[in-house]
Image (cartoon, rainbow, N blue to C red):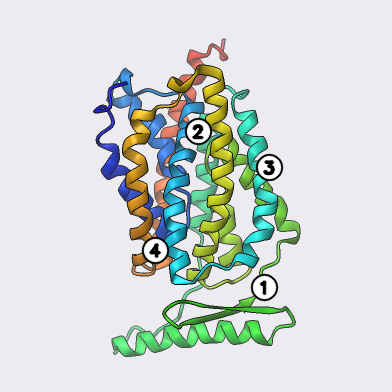
Amino acid sequence: MDFSLYWFMFPVSLMVATIAMMSGIGGAAFFTPIFLVIFPLLGPEYVITPVQAVGTALFIETFGFSSGFVGYYRKGLIDFKSALPFIAVAVPVGIIGALLASEVPGWAITGGYALLMVVLGTVMLRHHEEVEIPLDDVTLEEVEEATRLHTSERQTSAVESSQDTRTITGRDGHSYTFAIPRQGIASVVTAIGALLTGLLSVGIGEVTMPQLAKRNRVPIPVAAATSVLVVIVTVALTSFTHIAALVKGGGLSAVPWHLVAYAVPAVVIGGQIGPRIQGRVPHKTMEQVIGSLFLVIAIAMVFVAYNKFMLAGVGH
């Protein structure tokens, strides 16, 4: 292996991990298209198979989210009790998806990824609830007060509802009170996200964060931190399943360690940066940017899937 081949993945992985930690979305959502779309453009020596791409993306994400978990844990924002129901559903289903991945044709994995990006991109670009603030003669203090009152109203609404509430107090002393999240029928959505994570490397973070923040109205800082915990447990066990399958089928050389060597330390660093700057970019803006990027990724992946489909001779 040429360990100088993937040197550029250090800065790329650093950026990806930072964005992932800020948004609560899995870094594999960015790594997999980089591996399958960008790498082939660089030359044949960079090409890896879809199964390698998924397994490697999840393996790298494990380290990035482990670092992010530590960062959010130090901030005291993780709601462990709310994470457990998600983990109980996601882990076994994610492992099943990883075991099935080696049986799925490469073009199907790529095409499925493209479809998933369309869905996720569309969902993230949907209209979100905003704090309504007049635009005329507004001072910074008035904006901050309006945001504080909006948050207080949401917390009061949760307390006054019939649903039980929970309070998470961060290390900075700020408390968040919200109705205890319930899965119910939404556990099916969690299972689908976990299955897609095992098959395509993306899904669990993308279904967990919306369930917490939108469906259950958990405050964004707590939702992002809790989503990271769900993702890291699910992705860790899923990625180990992938790596074990790759090694079993092709030996240690089946895993692109010369890529992992640059990506892992970068995502560990990015995992510490993300939680520190979380909240500096408005969450809606972050979602709009990432949602638009997902749609662009989807278009590129469609072309990749079509080429793989034709090369496999399925169309004849």
**Element assignment for label 3:** helix
> How far separated are the C-alphas under marks 3 and 1?
24 Å
Q: Which of marks 4 and 1 is nearer the N terminus?
A: 1
Find residue 14 and name its label: none
Find residue 55 and name its label: 2
Q: Hey, what amino acid is under mark 4?
A: Pro
Find residue 93 and name its label: 3
Q: Hey, what amino acid is under mark 1?
A: Ile
Find residue 275 and name its label: 4
**Element assignment for label 4:** helix
Q: Earlier in the sequence, mark 4 or mark 2?
A: 2
Circle 2 residues within 10 Å: few <14, some 14–19, many ≥20: many
> How far separated are the C-alphas under marks 2 and 1?
34 Å
Q: Hey, what amino acid is under mark 3?
A: Val
Circle 3 residues within 10 Å: few <14, some 14–19, many ≥20: many
Find residue 180 and name its label: 1
Q: Which of marks 3 and 2 is nearer the N terminus?
A: 2
Point out residue 315 in the picture as x, y percentages from the top left corner. 56, 14
Q: Earlier in the sequence, mark 3 or mark 1?
A: 3
**Element assignment for label 1:** loop
User: Looking at this view, is 155 or 168 the one in front?
Assistant: 168
For the question of whether residue 298 can be seen, the reply is: no
Point out residue 123 in the picture as x, y percentages from the top left corner. 53, 55
Point out residue 18 in the picture as x, y percentages from the top left corner. 35, 54
Point out residue 36 in the picture as x, y percentages from the top left corner. 41, 30
130 lies above or below 202: below
Q: Which of marks 2 and 1 is nearer the N terminus?
A: 2
